[in-house]
Image (cartoon, rainbow, N blue to C red):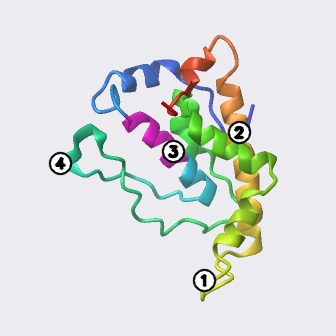
Amino acid sequence: MIPGVARADDEYCASVKETPPYNEGRRLLDVMDMAVLDFLMGNMDRHHYETIEMFGNNSAPLHLDHGRGFGQAFLDEASILAPLYQCCVMRHSTLATLLRFHTGPERLSAAMVASMARDPLRPVLWPPHLYALDRRLNTVLQVTRRCLHPPKDPNNVIIDDFH
């Protein structure tokens, strides 16, 4: 059990999966990706998201307002991952990316440093925030691993999006 992470509530997510717009298309998986991103940067202030109405359920959520992101390097707020540990679904491509940064050769923190190397405001992130990225990545993988335990069918947890 991961400290601060409640047990999955299969009944809650079952009802979400039956509710438009989460019952078809990409929306539910987009919300999972948004929760992972918010957790990695410690953004505890995601109260809603926006979409582009004219695209309907094919609109990806717009990630606006990251004002609380990278605010507290020493606090990992597990409730940010509630969508993931309640629904236990993740895109295969998201998991593959997370695993690539976990196993190397380049850690997520190193990739962030490299991506910001030319920023005129560098260093953009304080070293404890970089350490937090790698620590939080491990937590996301722990939650995902717990989602894969029986009786869950891995094909219903890790959703193939490479087709």
Residue, disc 1: 119
104 over 28 or under it: above or below:
below
Q: CA distance from mark 3 to mark 2?
A: 13 Å
Q: Main secondary structure of the magenta part?
A: helix
Q: Can the viewer see residue 53?
A: yes
Q: Earlier in the sequence, mark 3 or mark 2?
A: 3
113 over 162 or under it: above or below:
below
Residue type of the residue flagged with mark 1? Asp
Kindly report which numbered mark, 3 or 4, lies closer to the viewer in this rendering: 4
Kindly report which numbered mark, 4 or 2, lies closer to the viewer in this rendering: 4
Q: CA distance from mark 1 to mark 4?
A: 35 Å
Residue at left 36%, top 49%? 61
Measured as percent of width and height from the top left, residue 144 is found at 66, 33
Measured as percent of width and height from the top left, residue 102 is found at 77, 47
129 sits left or right of 11 in the view: right
Measured as percent of width and height from the top left, residue 6 is found at 62, 32
Query: What is the number of the mark on residue 33?
Result: 3
Q: CA distance from mark 4 to mark 2?
A: 35 Å
Residue, disc 2: 141
Residue, disc 4: 54
Q: What residue range appears in magenta?
A: 26-35
| The quadrant where residue 123 appears | bottom right
